[in-house]
Image (cartoon, grey):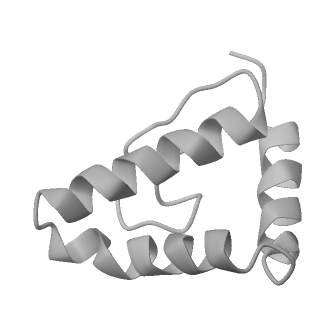
């Protein structure tokens, strides 16, 4: 999945065996972008931070990403 598919602004691909692997890769990508001062990724980073702070509220997004990952073709 790409950063954009996960709610971010770019098309950087993330790979993983599970949807959790891909979500964690996106989290690392957004943290790195924030650290590098990338203002374009900042809104997505703020959203990701809020998801981790309020996991019960974020289950809808999580389930959407899980379904999107499951619908992807095998590499």
What residue do we see at 78% from left, 76% from top? Answer: 58
What residue do we see at 11% from left, 57% from top? Answer: 36
Q: Is residue 69 left or right of residue 23?
A: right
Q: Is residue 33 left or right of residue 31?
A: left
What residue do we see at 73% from left, 80% from top? Answer: 54
Where, quadrant-wise, is the C terminus in this rendering?
top right
Query: Does 68 sit above or below residue 13?
Result: below
Percent coordinates x, y for residue 65 in the rendering: 77, 56
What residue do we see at 18% from left, 59% from top? Answer: 35
Percent coordinates x, y for residue 22 in the rendering: 62, 39
Q: Is any part of residue 3 visible from this angle?
A: yes
Q: Is any part of residue 11 visible from this angle?
A: no
Q: Is residue 11 left or right of residue 60?
A: left
Query: Does 39 sit above or below residue 25?
Result: below
Q: Quadrant of residue 63?
A: bottom right
Q: Residue furthest top?
A: 75
Q: In front: 61, or 55? A: 55
Where, quadrant-wise, is the N terminus in this rendering?
top right
Q: Quadrant of residue 12?
A: top left
Q: Is residue 43 left or right of residue 25?
A: left
Percent coordinates x, y for residue 42 in the rendering: 30, 76
The number of numbered discs placed on residues in the rendered structure image is 0
Q: In front: 11, or 20? A: 20
Q: Residue furthest left?
A: 37
Percent coordinates x, y for residue 68 in the rendering: 80, 51
């Amino acid at each position: 999945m790409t950063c954009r598919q996960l709610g971010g602004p770019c098309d950087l691909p993330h790979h993983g065996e599970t949807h959790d692997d891909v979500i964690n890769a996106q989290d690392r990508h957004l943290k790195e972008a924030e650290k590098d001062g990338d203002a374009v990724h900042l809104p997505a980073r703020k959203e990701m931070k809020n998801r981790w702070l309020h996991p019960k509220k974020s289950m809808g997004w999580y389930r959407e990403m899980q379904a999107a990952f499951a619908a992807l073709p095998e590499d």
